Every structure is written in C-alpha cells, then in structure tokens.
Amino acid sequence: MTAALDLLDLDPSLTDEERQIRDVVRQLVDDRVRPHVTDWYEQGQVPARELAREFGKLGLLGMHLTGYGCAGASAVAYGLACQELEAGDSGLRSLVSVQGSLAMYAIWRYGSEEQKQRWLPSMATGEAIGCFGLTEPDHGSDPASMTTRARRDGDDWVLSGAKMWITNAPIADAAVIWARTDEGVRGFLVPMDTPGVTAREIRRKMSLRASVTGEIALDDVRLPADARLPEAIGLKAPLSCLTEARYGIVWGAVGAARDCLETTLAYATTRTQFGRPLAGFQLTQAKLADMAVELVKGQLLALHLGRLADAHRLRPEQVSVGKLNNVREALAIARQCRTILGANGVSGEYPIMRHANNLESVLTYEGTSEIHQLVVGQRLTGISAFA
C-alpha cells in the first residue's frame, strides 16, 4: 500500500513476521500475476495448477493449518496473504481459499487420520488440487434443501446428485462432497477419477474469469465406507468451513479495493484536464477521501477479526459483519474509481473494471449480502428470519 493510503498508520501494528509474509506474497503477485492477469481474464483461462504449485512452495495453501506440511501461520498472516492475492485478482485468492479454507480445512477438521495423511501433504504443496461441493444447481443459499443423496449399499456408499459453481472442480483431484443421508447431512472425500464422477467447466462467465469454475455430476458414485469424513455431522460442518473461507474474503476484498484506489490515485495525480491534474479538483478529492476512509475502516475490521481469530474468540456472525461490510464497500470503491478514470476505467489497461466484475461474484458467493444481513439480524434480535 502506498504511504498515502495508510491514513491510520496500521503498518506498525503488524508483527515483523506478518509484514514479511505480506511482502513476499505481494512480490509474487507483482512478478507472477500482474504481467499476465489481464490476458488470463480476457481469455477466460488461467494456469491454475502451475500457480498452485508456486503458491505451495511459499506455504500459502492451508497456511493457517498445522501439521501435514502446512505452515501453521497466524490468522492475520493468512489474511494479509489473501489481501495481496486479491489485489492481483479475486480468482487467485479463490484458488487459495477454496484449496486451504474449504477443501483442506474440511479434511483437517473432520477427516480421519488416514484421509489427512493421504491428501493434506500433497494439497499443501499444490501437487493435488481440492474442491468443495456444497452449492447445487437449484440450491445456493439454502443448503439445507440439498438434493444430493448418499445411500448405504452394504459397506459402501453410493452418491447421486449435482453440485454447481464449484471453484477448482474441473482441475481437482479430490472433492469434498456434502450429501443428505438417512442420518442427516454428511461429508465425503471423493477422488475425481472415481467412476460416475464428471466435472464440466462453466464458460461464458463475465466475472472471475481468471478462476476455474465447474459443475460436478455424481451418477451412482460408489465409495468405500472410509470415504466419509467421520467427524462431519450435520450442516454445522460445511457451514464451519464456509466461515473459514469467508474470513479470507474479509481481507481479500480489501486487497481488490486497495488496488483500485492505488491505481486511481496514480491516475488522478497525472491525468490533466482543464489545465490541472484531476486530483486538483474538489469533487475528485472528495471521492478519493471517502474511498480512503472506507478502505482503512475495512482494514481495521479485518485486522480486528484476525486478532480475534488468533485469540480463538472469533464467532461466525463476526465474520458475517466483515464479509458484509468489506465486500460491499470494496465494490462501491471499484465503481467510484471507475468514474474518476472515465472511459479508461473500462479498459483492460487498468484493473478497475476487472476488480469490479470480480467483486460482483464475491458479493454473492459463500453467503450473499442478504444472508449475512440475516445472520447479523439474528444475532441482534435473537430471532431467525431465514424461513
């Protein structure tokens, strides 16, 4: 971040290790992502497996988990990494957070020791890719209505159903699939080469184009008994995984907003209109000031939630506060930055419109703004308004 944008001098509140991790990830994004991300976005293709291995070498995959080759970093350090990744592109942060906070976390938290030993070390290095199958074609915000079924057949399980909008699915080696059973919702670890499993890439996306997204079809997929995640019982299990991933979004959205504002600040101070820089006009400065205030508020919120997480005191509704606020404000910042750049704001030469389009998806996935409003509302009133 430019010194001008650190209005409240937050940098000294980070530890040396946290700053070092942030700077290493920022350098990776500058060297490996920025020169290519516009082409990836335009082409709708990204070298996800190659990037995953590079992220793995830096310990970014499952970095907040312990053991099994994971880095065991702090929640704040993980958040800072997400911030720098999403400053490059939301799709890159999605790759890392789906791998680490959804697929790996589900195995780490709910899997058997055999499942952890089999998958986590290779997923930490990026040699194996995971995905997380919860959302269905007809059931997004209402996972309790899922129709994917798992039935017992002797000692085996047989899965049937479909999952939609699954990040990493077309390139994944394993999927954590959530299905309804006679005993309630359960999680299953499904190798993607299992007979009956097919993954189709979703094309024609106008958002998150530098991310691999797919649909998973499960046609009487037979799995051994030990494919079930033994500790995953009920909907609380997948929802806890979503809380992990949403925490990364709280930080990531700030990164996208920061990149927009840094770009706009540089543009406004060098672009001349009516004989002086755009930044010299009162209306422009008012826009810049308002955006900078919202940005630093989002950073403060993310940092506070990170400190709560490291103290093991972070609650799900607090993460909802963070995602609701930071994604909403990041999107508003991106749109406002576009107005200062004028027509150049829609050009791929600048990252503004790409971030804005990506943030439209981030606003929706892993809990829409409306869902998070209801989570906060329930906390305030003690009354559930979900049904």
Image (spheres, grey):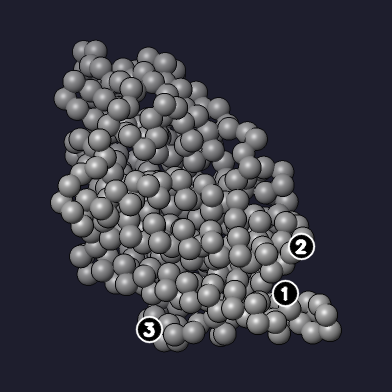
The image quadrant of residue 150 is: top left
Residue 295 position in % (x across, y down): 49, 72
Amino acid type indicated by mark 1: Tyr
Q: Earlier in the sequence, mark 1 or mark 3?
A: 3
Amino acid type indicated by mark 2: Asn
Q: Which numbered disc covers residue 13?
A: 3
Q: Which numbered disc covers residue 344?
A: 2
Distance from the alpha carbon under mark 2 to that under mark 1: 10 Å
Residue 201 position in % (x across, y down): 58, 31
Q: Which residue is mark 1?
A: 267
Q: Residue at x 72, y 74 (%)?
A: 267
Residue 154 position in % (x across, y down): 21, 13
Q: Earlier in the sequence, mark 3 or mark 2?
A: 3
Q: Earlier in the sequence, mark 2 or mark 1?
A: 1
**CB within 8 Å, label 2 to label 1:** yes
How crowded pointer 2 is (Cα within 10 Å; few <14, some 14-19, many 20+) is rated as some
Determine the secondary structure under disc 2: helix
